[in-house]
Image (cartoon, grey):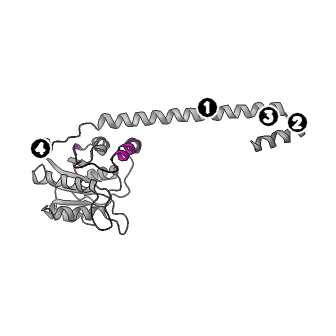
Amino acid sequence: MRYQRDIRHLYSRCPVTNGVTLTEMGRLMKSIKRFLLRTIFVLLIFAVLFFVIANLAVFAKGRGAMDDITAIEPKTAAIVFGAKVYENGQLSPMLEDRVQTAIDLYHLGKVKKLLLTGDHGRVGYDEVNTMKKYALDRRIAEEDIFTDHAGFSTYESIYRARKVFKLKKAVLVTQRFHLRRTLYIARSAGLEAQGLVADKREYISGTMSTFREYFANLKAFWEVNTGKDPTFLGPAIPISGDGRKSRG
């Protein structure tokens, strides 16, 4: 407001500036203001449309999450998506339930391999080897455990599963709130996938995680439709081989 008063005072002392009257200047300012408001309105419309279209696409292609482990068709591997691990080496509740669900699939003969994918991109934080230790402690053969140390996002984990580990058929193991997005990305990548719900308890962050998914879907939709490359690829490590070759 003070700025506007200063402008009015300036032009009241100088009614004509460079051939433009104060009245004309006022009209110009109003035109600029209308243009900016219209631009903001159009951008908001596009943002809302993108939000709706992206979420509808994820919901349509990501349907079919399954609760019944016995109804899962045999697949080559279970992909376990990383989540938080604690400094003491303990898995967070969400991650523990994901790994345990994959272990259950393995012992039921539904999958032959486990692909443990997560964040191991910085010193002192290692989702992948923490998951591997948990699986080894529960009688999973070491050669059947594949580790992906560059699964920095759901998209990158699935992209690498296809390109690096040459995986074609998989069970995606994660919580219900996350499964639509994982199934959408996997099916868009040409992976024949079923999604198994890994919820074994109530989670403190459950409601917030569900809310965040609506915005995570925007990123997934963008990555899928732009063909974004992952941070790292590297040499092929076929899932049909020995998982010990994947150690990092």
Which residue lies at the image location 33% right of the left edge and 63% below the top edge?
120
Quick one: label 2, few (<14), some, or many (20+) residues within 10 Å? Answer: some
- The spot of residue 29 in percent (x, y) is 74, 34
Q: Would you say 100 lies left or right of 109 here?
A: right
Amino acid type, residue under disc 4 in the picture? Thr
Amino acid type, residue under disc 3 in the picture? Met
Is disc 4 placed on a helix, strand or loop? Answer: helix
Return the disc, 2 or 3, that comes first in the chain's sequence.
2
- Pointer 4: what residue? 70
Distance of label 1 from label 4 (alpha carbons) = 56 Å
Return the disc, 3 or 1, that comes first in the chain's sequence.
3
State the mark number for residue 16: 2
- Pointer 3: what residue? 25
Is disc 2 placed on a helix, strand or loop? Answer: strand
Amino acid type, residue under disc 2 in the picture? Val
Distance of label 4 from label 2 (alpha carbons) = 84 Å
